[in-house]
Image: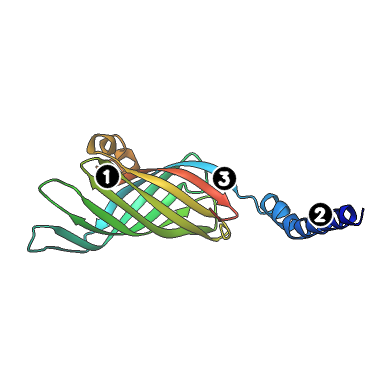
Amino acid sequence: MKGTILRWSLVLALVAILAMFGAPLAVSPAAAATIRIPIDNYFICCSMDPGTMWFSDDGILHIRDRVLQAVVTSNEDYHAGTGQNWANANIDPATGYGTYHGYMEIYPTAYDGLWGGHWSMQITPSGAGGIARLQGYGELSGLATKSELTPLPPPVLANLAYLCGGNQPISGVHAVGFVMDPGGE
């Protein structure tokens, strides 16, 4: 009998301890759930300052601090507006393959604020793509975005010339992802 009472006491003590330490874990995810709003954007670069370019001894073209001015179209008003991109690249001119990275800002028309953050992309024999992670500032403070990037080929860019006042866009990407509130993963 004493053994049964002792076992039940230990089981109840264990349950109480688990409840005390497990309850905050059970409540926190629901309270801190991130709302994800799907976004579908086009970041179309219309003009640029070419930055600095040079070829290394191995024939790779290096571009640093290229500044591109852009128009941003979107299915949500979180991003629709204008943008600026500070770009860097290392490209093999013989194949067109390379790595690209930089910093971008988006100034949405509907908000007094901006998005700012880093992006990176690769073009390889197996395909092209990248990622952008941006934080919100001003009215967008506390929000974040994460997007998968796909570079747009020249024929698609030609169809978007109306965004650049009828001129051929320099470059552009299709970005598909989420606005996250709060700005977590």
Instruction: Classify 157 as above or below 1.
Output: above
The x and y percentages for residue 71 are 38, 48
Q: Mark 3 highlights which residue?
A: 36
Specify few, some or many for label 2: CA neighbours under 10 Å numbering under 14, 14-19, or 20 or more.
Answer: few
Which circle's residue, 1 or 2, is located before the other in the chain? 2
Which of the 4 quarters of the picture holds residue 15? bottom right
Give whichever of 71, 126 is nearer the camera.
Answer: 126
Q: Is residue 88 above or below residue 74?
A: below
Question: Which residue in the structure is indicated by mark 2?
Answer: 11
Instruction: Give the image location of residue 54, x and y in percent.
Output: 13, 63
Name which residue lies at 46% across and 44% down.
177
Callout 3: SS: strand
Label 3 – label 2 distance at C-alpha: 41 Å
Can residue 126 be seen here? yes
Q: CA distance from mark 1 to mark 3?
A: 31 Å
Q: Earlier in the sequence, mark 3 or mark 2?
A: 2
Compared with 116, 153 (above or below) is above
Give the residue at x 20% y 42%.
125
Residue marked by disc 1: 169
Element assignment for label 2: helix
